[in-house]
Image: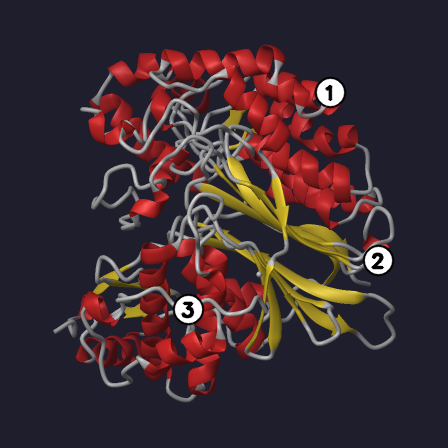
Amino acid sequence: MYTNRLFALLVVALLGLTGCQSARPDGAPLYTQVVAADQPLASQAGARMLEQGGNAVDAAVAAAFTLSVVRPQSCGMGGGGFMVIHLPHAASRDGTYVDTAINARERCPGGVGSGTFEASTDPTASTIGGLAVAVPSSVAGLLHAQERYGKLERSAVLQPAIDAARGGFIVDSAYMVVAADTIEKFRAEPSLQTRFGFLWTTLLKSGGVREGDRITNPAQAVALGEIARSGRAAFYSGPIADAIVRATRDAGGVITHQDLQRCMGSGVSEVPPLRSFALGHTFLTMPPPSSGGVALVQVVSMLGLRGADRLIGVDEPAFAHELTECFKLAFADRAAFMADPAFSPVPVHGLLSKGDLAARAGMIDPARTHGPERYARSSVPAQSRPDHGTSHVSAVDRWGGACAATETINLSFGSWVCAEPYGFLLNNQMDDFTTRRGASNAFGLTQSDANAPEPGKRPLSSMTPTIVLDAYERVEAVAGASGGPRIITATAQALINALVRGDDAGAAVSRARLHHQWMPGTLWLEPLPDPVDAARMTESLAAKGHAIKPAKGEAAVQLITRRGVQHGESLATYTAASDPRKGGMPAGTRAE
């Protein structure tokens, strides 16, 4: 089975058959400092900060606030996110060395409990409307990062976003894909056009939005201006907070001023990043409640333990099978153990211990895949001693500082609820909780009861902001992605392409990819134009028992890779790429 011509046009990620063969294609630019975001205005906003003497944190924060304007379908002030920061002495505000992770994930409102959604008769309660909204933390997190670690004034960092809101952005094909789907839903149920009027009239132009249109948002410019002047207090108290509470309440939600005040005071936590050595490199990534960091480390570590990286370029179907099995093992653990560690113990050190990784890697059968029960654990791994709708921004500055920031409002256009009259949409992050026991969420993910909603709790996430260092603690790569659970698999594959294959950033993000999340038992493959190699790949994987379906490029990676110090140059140089699956373009200072 799976040998017909349709599946012959499919291929696994990392095959090296997409036409991106060279380490750096002729003419690909090198940068001494650069930002990669999935919309050009956001990358340019970050680059402006670098040109003004800002560091990678300033650049990432400027890009993230600008994305709130130009990628309203993906992220914004009404959402939350994670950030991983690496700053050598010269890059930091006060000359200290910084390795840190910032958790600005949204929190469950005080009025929602573990049985709230099960008691609701509305099957869309966790995805559409006010009850779907978790307490937004993005503004608190971005300002915390910039004020503590950035070099520039807050007003300068927010200015590009204010400019973008006033001047507008041009609708591109990535925006139209999401807009067209949303318009179809609104036309099928006309009452939505009234319930979610800002989304319908402003962002969808009453169903008439087209590629090439300009969308302005002066209302959001007002909110951004207030934040630039007064900081987080402007968002979590006063008129903007009133608008958030009113909008969620009018749409059936329960967020209160007390929820927002708690977020302003304690909505951001700073922890050491997960730090692990694999495939010859040091990975700095996000700990729980992100599941992405743990899963990423598991995957690259198991590949290294099995020596599967040596199959690259030698036996690509065998490597594809090994990679898929690593993903299945990691996602089975995600479903069983991942949650907010402030509420439920998460056995991070057990999952990442050498013994456990070796045991899990040893379960991989090179001859075939197996049913889901093989990958699920019967017991919790023993703890060891400590060895710890989305958009992503990767940034590197002239001093070798790096920032990986992933921001989200969850599904496309979030909950569809707008905090009027301030022009930003609110998230539907409550769907990332286990809202109904035994049921999968909008991404098809099955999650444990430990991830059930509780007041103040953060939902599980797949966001995977990651910085990779060499033996001298120099930045080798900065990566992250959008795309729900595909964030994990896409980020892992882009990094493997760069670190093991030696791809430059453009080649690394452009190769075809695969995705498997354990449940459902499907291997998604992106298409490849060469039917002969595709047929060999799909036939090999099908013979091992994989159920194959075509993927559509649902994840988008933003990647920066270090090319080293070139002859006659004093600064390191980097390649940068914004994933062609979503658009965008990096911006920065070109190497001479």
N-terminal of the two: label 1 or label 3? 1
The residue located at (18%, 24%) in the rendering is 121
Identify the mark nearer the N-term, 2 or 3.
2
The residue under label 3 is 382
Viewed as shown, does residue 550 lie left or right of 51? left
Q: CA distance from mark 1 to mark 2?
A: 29 Å
What is the x, y in percent for residue 162?
A: 67, 25
What label sits on residue 89 in the rendered view? 2
Comparing 471 with 451, the one in front is 451
Q: Position of residue 98 (x, y in %)?
A: 75, 55
What amino acid does circle 2 point to?
Answer: His
- Dot 1 and dot 3 residues touching (CB under 8 Å): no
Q: Nearer the viewer, residue 213 or 243?
A: 243
Closer-to-camera residue (446/522): 446
> Which residue is label 1 attached to?
230
Q: Amino acid at mark 1?
A: Ser
Along the horizontal axis of the image, is 501 left or right of 539? right
Q: Badge 2: few (under 14), some or many (20 or more) residues near its Cα, within 10 Å? A: some
Q: Locate residue 487: give its quadrant.
A: bottom left
Q: Callout 3, which amino acid?
A: Ala
Q: Nearer the viewer, residue 44 or 220?
A: 220
| Coordinates of residue 63 in the picture (x, y in percent) | 64, 40
Question: Vertically, is 125 above or below 239?
Answer: below
